[in-house]
Image (cartoon, grey):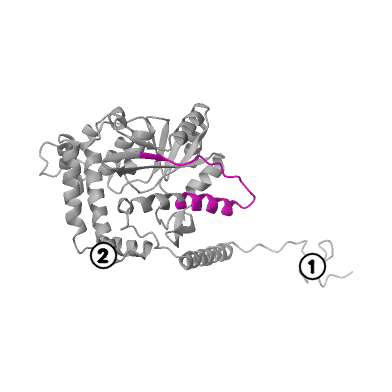
Amino acid sequence: MGSTAALAAPESSNTGAEPTGGAPPRDWKDRLIDRLVPALRVIPPWLAWWAGQCLGDVVGGLPIRDVRRAREHLAQAFPGKGRAWAAATARHGFRHFGGMMLWTIATLQRPSAAHRRGLVVEGVDNLRALARASRRGEGTLGFSGHFGNWEMLPRLGGAFVPTAVIGKRMRNPRADRLIAAARTRDGATMIYQDDDVRSCVRELRAGKLVGTLPDQDIPRLAGVFVPWFGTDAYTPSGPAALALLANVPVQPIFCYHKHGRWVLHLGPRKKFPRSRDRAADMTAITAWAMAYEEALVRRAPHQWVWWHRRWRTRPEDVAREAALAAEKAAKKTLATEAAKPALAPSPYSTSSPAQTDPMSPPPGTPS
């Protein structure tokens, strides 16, 4: 894995010109990464945090779709707080994530030991239990979410136990390489959602903490409906299925900001029993993990991504998609059967009136 410095470097000295040869042209996102990452790496982290907050505050005050959506979702999740509180919290959230984003980029080259200084740990006994299990070669499926600063978890988790993280590929290859390098810099392993599930099982059976972020509505992934702030929300069931497949405990793990310091929060390490009803088992694990995260989000609601459409998929949508898939499969089966060549009648078939006995003479033959 290359360094982030190499990833951030321009492909040519003339960044205003299109690259020569067979290299694809770079879009504005590539150029932004080329300029932003090296600039942020040379400024103090506190300045990056302040600048990001200022930028986020400006964005949070604009009449754009994500801001409106964040306000609406906050009002739905906290119906007793009022519209003014929802608007103020939404803006506070954009301010937080602006600061988090620039601070995280500015500290890409900092060693993990530097992050541990001043770190607050909530759930010390749970952390010790996780470390002891890892030393025994027992893996743990970590449930996290888009709360606080999830990009800090590979850096901090890897400082205590061997860690692997499951994530999706970014649409922009340059951003994908940058994020992968940041996540694996301190020894964590990167696993993509479209990788073979056996790679996840191997990491778990090697005693690693495998981190996941299942707190979003992703229609293309298999999921279950579990409560999220009083309304059932479609949630990926893959992490729960993986925990059942590998027969390992699950554990909540988060990193959030509190009083100017990062807090590493670890919940209890819990082993769910397996029953004959696999769907019910996955729902139970997922519901428990989401309820735990919801309790944390209520402590600091501005640190969750409220512009995400968490309640987008409804049960009737899933039922309709299942019906359409079944209809499509049935049509495909009928088309396959219709395309098969007709079989010639067997001479031994008793359904042929012309020749019921293959050894009898043809009709009209004198006896």
**Is residue 301 magenta-colored?**
no
Query: Is 352 left or right of 165, judged from the image as shown?
Result: right
Kind of residue sitting beneath label 1: Gln
Query: Is 293 left or right of 59, judged from the image as shown?
Result: right
Q: Which mark, residue 84?
A: 2
- Quadrant for residue 233, please give it: bottom left
Whole-percent x and y of residue 114?
27, 29
Q: CA distance from mark 2 to mark 1?
A: 89 Å
Which range is magenta? Answer: 264-291
Query: Is 68 left or right of 35, judged from the image as shown?
Result: right
Kind of residue sitting beneath label 2: Ala
| Residue at 29%, 33% in the rendered image | 118
Element under label 1? loop
**Is residue 268 magenta-colored?**
yes
Q: Which residue is mark 1?
A: 355
Q: Would you say residue 219 is visible in this rendering?
A: yes
